[in-house]
């Protein structure tokens, strides 16, 4: 696939990472000596020097079984180089950054975007133009099929409405007319059927169908304090508002939480009031629920509302 597709997708991904994690000062993605994508604050000259240095280290590391990542710590920050699928990701973060949080974001977003781009099937303009100019014609049914269908419809019509043959009685015989001009031999049967229908009417219930509860993926943050309830988690206010809008009139008192291994539980929930954690895509969980879920800070969980 053309690297331009990767460049466009990963360029936006690096910008989103920087918006979510302001502590990430620089980031770029490359393959061998080719630069695939970079953020706006990183110069091409510094990137070229870093790529050359990384390739030299990677070449020497082949003698000991290969290289998966490099970590360089300085006085003003840290440099992390990691191999992700077919590309290498480089990030520079400050010493004050929550490294677990940054690693979780980058290790989830970048491989996911690469996988999605791999699944996209790009059609060239020449092939698309040829398809539009020469659409596949709709096959017409053969004439024999039309003749068979016409004959069949005629036969069914004759069976449903058979021809009536009038027999003229002799002149000296009297013909008794039964039931008058409006006599219908099926009247009795029709009245019985109508009686049965009246006695056993079919009732249809109006079922109210509920939408499938949406699943949201969040990062675990610890929730502690003396007055903090141990059975209540904290999530973003925007998520709660979306649930309320989607399930209008339904009570949502509990949330279903599940870790990456399938371990799950239910708990009460409130919105995050701290500006430090709000809008960061996290869920604040007390120690008691973390132990029950067998999860910890920095790991991913999924949540969905429990509808009464």
Image (cartoon, rainbow, N blue to C red):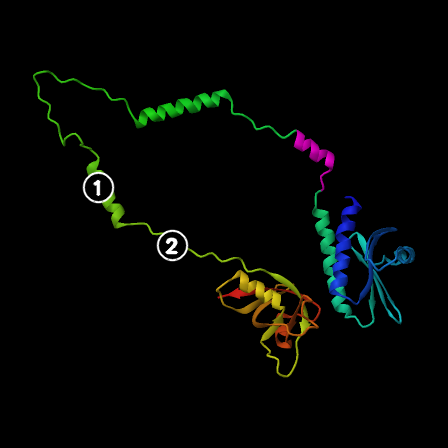
Q: Is residue 90 visible?
A: no
Q: Which mark is residue 165?
A: none
Dividing the picture into quadrants, the one containing residue 93 is: bottom right
Q: Is residue 280 above or below residue 32?
A: below
Residue 282 placement (x, y as % from top left): 67, 68
Q: How busy is the neighbourhood of tag 2: few (under 14 within 10 Å), some, or many (20 plus)?
A: few
The residue sitting at 14% across, 31% down in the picture is 180
- Position of 179 with respect to 208 (left or right) is left
Whole-angstrom CA distance, mark 2 to mark 1, is: 28 Å
The tag on residue 191 is: 1
Q: Earlier in the sequence, mark 2 or mark 1?
A: 1
Residue 88: give x, y in percent of width and height: 82, 55
Q: Magenta part mainly helix, strand or loop?
A: helix
Residue at 83%, 53% (x, y): give it. Answer: 30
Q: Is residue 247 magenta?
A: no
Q: Quadrant of the N terminus?
A: top right
Please say whether residue 303 is visible from this viewpoint: yes
* Percent x, y of residue 145: 47, 23
Helix, strand or loop under label 1: helix
Tell me the tag on residue 205: 2
Question: Residue 24 appears in which quarter of the rendering?
Answer: bottom right
- In the rendered image, residue 159, in percent from the top left (x then y), is placed at 31, 26
Nearer to me, 276 or 226 = 276
Q: Is residue 29 above or below residue 193?
A: below
How many marks overall? 2
Look at 73% across and 58% down and name the residue there. Answer: 109
Magenta-drawn segment: 122-133
């Amino acid at each position: 696939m053309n690297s331009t597709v990767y460049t466009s997708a990963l360029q936006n991904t690096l910008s989103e990472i920087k918006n979510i994690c302001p502590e990430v000062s620089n980031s770029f993605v490359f393959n061998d000596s080719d630069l695939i994508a970079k953020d706006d604050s990183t110069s091409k000259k510094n990137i070229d020097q870093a790529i050359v240095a990384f390739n030299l280290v990677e070449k020497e590391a082949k003698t000991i079984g290969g290289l998966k990542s490099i970590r360089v710590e300085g006085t003003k920050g840290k440099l992390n180089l990691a191999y992700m699928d077919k590309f290498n990701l480089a990030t520079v973060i400050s010493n004050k950054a929550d490294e677990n949080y940054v690693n979780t974001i980058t290790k989830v977003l970048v491989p996911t975007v690469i996988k999605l781009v791999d699944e996209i099937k790009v059609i060239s303009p020449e092939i698309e133009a040829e398809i539009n100019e020469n659409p596949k014609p709709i096959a017409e049914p053969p004439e024999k099929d039309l003749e068979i269908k016409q004959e069949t419809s005629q036969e069914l019509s004759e069976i449903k409405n058979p021809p009536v043959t009038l027999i003229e009685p002799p002149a000296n015989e009297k013909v008794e007319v039964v039931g008058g001009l409006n006599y219908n031999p099926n009247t009795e049967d029709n009245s019985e059927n109508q009686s049965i229908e009246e006695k056993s009417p079919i009732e249809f219930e109006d079922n109210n169908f509920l939408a499938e509860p949406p699943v949201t993926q969040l990062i675990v943050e610890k929730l502690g304090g003396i007055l903090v309830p141990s059975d209540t988690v904290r999530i973003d206010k925007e998520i709660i508002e979306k649930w309320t809008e989607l399930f209008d009139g339904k009570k949502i008192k509990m949330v279903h939480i599940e870790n990456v291994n399938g371990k799950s539980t239910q708990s009460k929930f409130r919105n995050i009031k701290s500006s430090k954690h709000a809008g960061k895509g996290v869920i604040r969980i007390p120690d008691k629920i973390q132990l029950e879920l067998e999860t910890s800070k920095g790991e991913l969980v999924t949540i969905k509302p429990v509808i009464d």
